[in-house]
Amino acid sequence: MSSLPDQAAVAAAIAAFEADLAAAPSPREAQTVRDKYLGRKNSVVASWMQLIATAPPDEKRNIGRFANELKAAIEERWNAHAERADAGARPSGAVDITLPGRVGALGRRHPLTSVRDRMEAIFTRMGFAVVEGPEIEDEWHNFDALNMPAEHPARDMQDTLYLATPVKGETGRADDRRTLLRTHTSSMQIRYMQAHQPPIRIVVPGRVFRRDDLDLTHSPAFGQIEGLAVGEGISLADLKGTLLAFARDMFSSTARVRFRPSFFPYTEPSAEVDISCWQCNGEGCPMCKKTGWIELGGCGMVHPAVFEAVGYDAEHYTGFAWGIGIERVAILRHQVQDIRLFFENDLRFLEQFPY
Ligand SMILES: [Zn+2]
């Protein structure tokens, strides 16, 4: 049996470890060197520990002390070596190509886009074509042609942001040249009818602008889907049937609709359309404010003055139109209390929507 470990043996073992490690040509060999001194079995430290069992009683403590001293010294040198190797292998800023790849986050449609797509799909199945129009409109298309001349009081309700950009007007009048952010998609009724002859069945989705302050239920910019059908013999019953079919597809297969008399300058008669509350089936609940009905939008039969503005024979053709807010439908479908959530783009909100 060789002599028992002493202080000189510790120093010698450390020196030997350092020499072996310095001579190791690769990380793999360096690991082997480490195991030779620190491994659980057959290493220098392990063999010193084994000596404790058979050593004379008064030597046991010293052997343990030297073994632990050697172990700590080698661990310290090994850790320093590993850190140096790590830093050397991967200079700062370099890409570690051995790491697993990062998977890009998958996006999804915004809930307002999903709702708009669904509305378009429903109306498309009923034979409506989807058309879009400009968000910057001139006064004539936005107001005058829709039976809202300059002095009309209904214009105040919708007054909006006028722009400095002049356009060539329809009538050549000075006030006709003003442009504005459209207050409704109804201006596209005019543009489409100017370019097409009946029969017409279109829906016009798009962003519209009002001089509203942002609060829980109002936004100065919001989405609408306009509907327009023009032809021979089109009646209020057709309008009601169309909106009922939409409500049943969008909200509930047992939905009912009701019309409340209302006023819009460009429809006559005009109505607000309500849908029976699908939460309580018309019984009354918090969602419908205990009325059993939920307001959906405005609608009516196209006013003869609108037909005259686009050169249609108002004696020959009839038609209906509606405007439904996209945010309104999204709020109802998803039970969202605050319209602002749709615009803030907080992922914690957006990720709650399934599609
Ligand atoms: Zn209800």
Image (cartoon, rainbow, N blue to C red):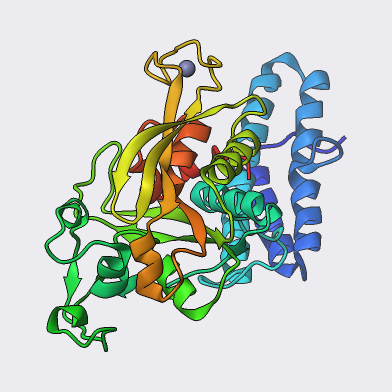
Can residue 127 be seen at all in this image of the molecule? yes
Observer-nearest of 216 and 64: 216
**Is 46 rendered above or below residue 80?**
above
Can residue 108 be seen at all in this image of the molecule? no
**In the picture provided, is 147 more to the left or to the right than 33?**
left
Q: Position of residue 161 (x, y in %)?
A: 19, 65
Q: Toward which corner of the image does residue 179 lie, by quadrant? A: bottom left
Q: Position of residue 306 (x, y in %)?
A: 36, 65
**In the picture provided, is 227 more to the left or to the right than 153?**
right
Task: Kindly identify the residue that appears in the image at 49 percent across and 44 percent down.
Answer: 350
Observer-nearest of 212 and 90: 212
Q: Residue furthest top?
A: 283
**In the picture provided, is 316 more to the left or to the right than 117?**
left
**Position of the N terminus by quadrant:** top right
Number of on-image labels: 0
Task: Kindly identify the residue that appears in the image at 43 percent across and 27 percent down.
Answer: 294
**Is 6 rendered above or below residue 148?**
above
Q: Residue furthest front?
A: 315
**Position of the C terminus by quadrant:** top right
Q: Position of residue 74 (x, y in %)?
A: 64, 47
Q: Position of residue 134 (x, y in %)?
A: 39, 73
Observer-nearest of 55 and 31: 31
Task: Kindly identify the residue that appears in the image at 56 percent across and 55 percent down.
Answer: 80
Task: Kindly identify the residue that appears in the image at 43 percent across and 74 percent down.
Answer: 191
